[in-house]
Amino acid sequence: MLFFVLCLKMLYICFGKLNFKNMKTIIITLAVSLISFNIFGQTYFQGGIYNDTEWLLENSPYIITGDVVLFPGKTLTIQPGVHVKFDGYYFLEIRGTLVAVGNESNRIVFTSNKTNPNKDDWYGIKTKNNQGASANFEYCDFSFAKTVNDVDCCFEGGPIDFRNCKFSNNTTVLAGYTGYNTIVDNCEFTNNIYCITNADKIISNSTFIGNEYGLYQTERIAVHKSTFQNNNIALYGGRQLVDSCIIENNDIGIKPSYEGFELRNNKIINNRIGVQLSNYDGGYPPIKNNLICNNSKYNIENLDDINKDITGNCWCSSDSTVIENKIYDGYDNIYLGLLNYDIYDEECETILKSVIKVALEINSPYFNSDIAIYPNPANEMITVSGINKLKRIEIYDISGKLLMSETKTHIVISNLPKGIYVLKIIDTNDFMVTKKLIKN
């Protein structure tokens, strides 16, 4: 206000007495100038944060001119609408607690200060979990970092949450592992190289569009109700569940690391390769209730010599030739294992036939090594032994037609004609063993 009064006095001295109309115009102009000065003010910062601190909207943008360290036991709170711009290859290191909670109309921005920014312009955020760090990011936008958030292991800090955040044009977005789960919910990933790496994260309700990798060599990262479109490789990893996701128009939808992901209830369509399969020490996770259709080269590609069960998935076709042409296994390359699968009707509601190429022994915690059918050959009744938690037993003829489905281990077969049959023994984890039965 004093500055405003002094300006008026100077105008009076310079231009003499002003009429009311001119005075009103000058006052409005000065008021707008003063507001603009406050809104577009900026704060330069580097060094340590040793006390609880708040970065205010009125002092935004904060221009980071050197590395910044938030020390243990201290909290940095960033107000909604604040922009944090890194004027070089610097980092923000969290050893205490960071609270960056924006809202839909006032998002918090972490980005480069360059006029023409590029990936790797600033180092990123280091979260020192091993020193008890925690962080809460909501409605935050991150761009042009080398690694948006890199977490040090293990078990000491947390939680670390990212909700309603956007990540674009970064080399790596979320890296490291913690020993507990980092939450990533309702976030957007676009035009990054590696979106999610390493381990210990739960991803839900998020979109991955136009990235090199959605997930890259991950383990212990679960993904729920998320969309992966137009990426080079959508999900590259394993050892967790991918459930109820849309995976489409990528070069490769699912690429395995170790034994790969457990896949349930996903829509995997219009990729070049839908799902690649692998194993670890002979074991592989269940792949059930997925829609795997219209992938241009292969719907399923086996990468090793282990025989696998992929029954319980729909291919959007009831034509066995069409389905087989999009499955790459030992029928195409003698060095690969064979894949058993089901043929559904085109509405994906009813199994028309099971294609059992090979009898399988599955490494399940509920199957004993001596799982057996007795008597075999049999006349009236059979008993299946060696399974602790049975889901069901299905009996097929040699053409793959389903004849019986039972939820008990003692099964009456007196009504079956003489011949050879295939039993699918399925546990509560949907692991399966196939056995041959002879009916006298």
Image (cartoon, rainbow, N blue to C red):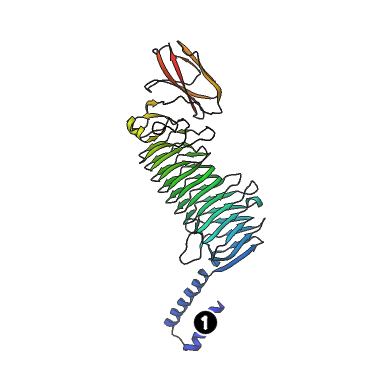
Considering the numbered disc 1 on the image, is that residue within a helix, a strand or a loop?
A: helix
Q: Against 198, is 31 above or below?
A: below
Q: Quadrant of the C terminus?
A: top left
Instruction: Name the amino acid type tagged 1.
Output: Cys
Tell me which residue sits at (51%, 72%) in the image.
37
Q: Nearer the viewer, residue 105 or 260?
A: 260
- Residue 318 visible somewhere in the drawing: no
Q: Position of residue 122 (x, y in %)?
A: 53, 61
Numbered-mark total: 1
* Residue 9 % position (x, y): 52, 85
Query: Residue 380 or 31: which is nearer the viewer?
Result: 380
Residue, far front: 334
Along the line of sight, which residue is nearer the eye, 306 or 293?
Answer: 306
Q: Quadrant of residue 254?
A: top left
- Please tell me which residue is depicted at 48% across the width and 21% down the height of the picture: 407
Q: Position of residue 246 (x, y in %)?
A: 42, 42
Instruction: Identify the residue shown where x is 56% and y is 23%.
Output: 368
Look at the picture and state if 436 lies above or below 319: above
Q: Which residue is mark 1?
A: 7
Answer few, some or many: residues within 10 Å of disc 1's Cα (few below 14, many 20 plus, some between 14 and 19). Answer: some
423 and 32: which is toward the camera:
423
Residue 370 place in picture, x, y as percent: 55, 21
Q: Quadrant of the N terminus?
A: bottom right
Instruction: Report whether 255 appears left or right of 149.
Output: left
Residue 135, above or below 57: above
Q: Which picture quadrant has residue 272? A: top left
The reply to whether residue 344 is visible in this rendering is yes
